[in-house]
């Protein structure tokens, strides 16, 4: 309990939240919780599994026809981007339109994610500054209470604990979350690239073996697959 102080928490946490909120638009703040939830909490699809899924779909479309993909689309609701990609296939979109739509949607998703990451990074910048402000507040109170020994202790607690809280929030909460979210955002961009390449190839009715080569060009070496042996 020696590390718990209400005024110090109010200064650092309240000030960090308010200043961070002022730094962004209401739309960015509104979309941030959902984007961060997706990046930090939801389970991510492995790129190799995504590549194998696209190759299976390509084989099925080549063997049974593109309209047969519609029976699979209903089972892809847990992956909205892939679900929309397969809807473009079954709706008869041209390869150019499908590629343009999916790239535009991926770019928009990436933009929302980067705004959310920037909010965390901004909070990490503000928290130590609010700790310093709280330290100055505590020092002013302490110097103004030198004739009252009982008031020196609480003022000193504010001065020291606000710096502690600011460093704690920045380096043990906001920055680690931002780093994890940024890594998840890069993984989602890679997944969307795999889905876009696969969707365009299915619409063009390309050979799945060629699709495997195309997908492996965007996958990191450790994630490349050998679907056809």
Image (spheres, rainbow, N blue to C red):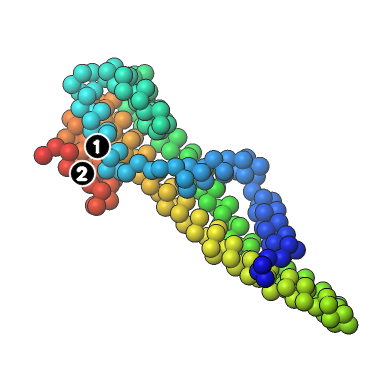
Contact flag, marks 1 and 2 (Cβ < 8 Å): yes
* Residue 140 or residue 202, whichever sits in front: 140
Q: Which residue is located at x 27 percent, y 43 percent?
A: 48
- Mark 1 residue crowding within 10 angstroms, few (<14) / some (14–19) / many (20+): some
- Image quadrant holding the N terminus, namely bottom right
* Residue 118 or residue 102, whichever sits in front: 118
| Circle 2 residue | 225
| Circle 1 residue | 52
Please identify the quarter of the rendering in which residue 131 is found. Answer: bottom right
Instruction: Say whether disc 1 or disc 2 marks the residue closer to the N-terminus.
Output: 1
Furthest-left residue in view? 229
Q: Position of residue 195 (x, y in %)?
A: 33, 35
Secondary structure under tag 1 reads helix
Q: Which residue is located at x 54 percent, y 40 percent?
A: 34
- Mark 2 residue crowding within 10 angstroms, few (<14) / some (14–19) / many (20+): some
Tell me if residue 149 comes above or below residue 72 in the rendering: below
Q: Position of residue 211 (x, y in %)?
A: 22, 35
- Image quadrant holding the C terminus, namely top left
Secondary structure under tag 2 reads loop
Q: Which mark is residue 100?
A: none
Q: Image check: 43 left or right of 10?
A: left
Q: Position of residue 142 (x, y in %)?
A: 81, 77
- Number of labelled discs? 2
Please indicate, yes or no, whether residue 3 appears anywhere in the rendered image: yes
Q: Which residue is located at x 23 percent, y 18 percent?
A: 65
Q: Position of residue 177 (x, y in %)?
A: 50, 55
How far apart marks 1 and 2 lie (CA) works out to: 8 Å
């Amino acid at each position: 309990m020696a590390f718990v102080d209400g005024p110090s928490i109010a200064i650092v946490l309240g000030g960090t939240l308010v200043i961070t909120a002022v730094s962004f638009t209401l739309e960015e703040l509104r979309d941030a919780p959902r984007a961060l939830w997706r990046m930090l909490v939801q389970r991510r699809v492995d790129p190799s599994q995504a590549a194998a899924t696209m190759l299976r779909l390509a084989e099925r479309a080549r063997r049974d026809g593109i309209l047969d993909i519609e029976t699979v689309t209903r089972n892809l609701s847990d992956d909205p981007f892939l679900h929309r990609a397969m809807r473009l296939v079954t709706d008869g979109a041209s390869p150019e339109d499908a590629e343009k739509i999916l790239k535009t949607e991926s770019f928009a998703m990436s933009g929302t994610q980067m705004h959310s990451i920037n909010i965390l990074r901004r909070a990490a910048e503000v928290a130590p500054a609010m700790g310093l402000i709280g330290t100055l507040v505590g020092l002013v109170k302490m110097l103004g209470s030198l004739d009252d020994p009982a008031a020196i202790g609480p003022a000193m607690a504010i001065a020291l604990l606000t710096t502690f809280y600011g460093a704690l929030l920045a380096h043990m909460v906001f920055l680690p979350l931002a780093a994890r979210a940024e890594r998840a955002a890069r993984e989602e961009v890679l997944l969307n690239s795999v889905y876009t390449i696969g969707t365009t190839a299915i619409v063009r009715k390309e050979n799945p073996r060629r699709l495997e080569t195309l997908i492996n060009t965007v996958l990191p070496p450790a994630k490349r697959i050998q679907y056809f042996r």
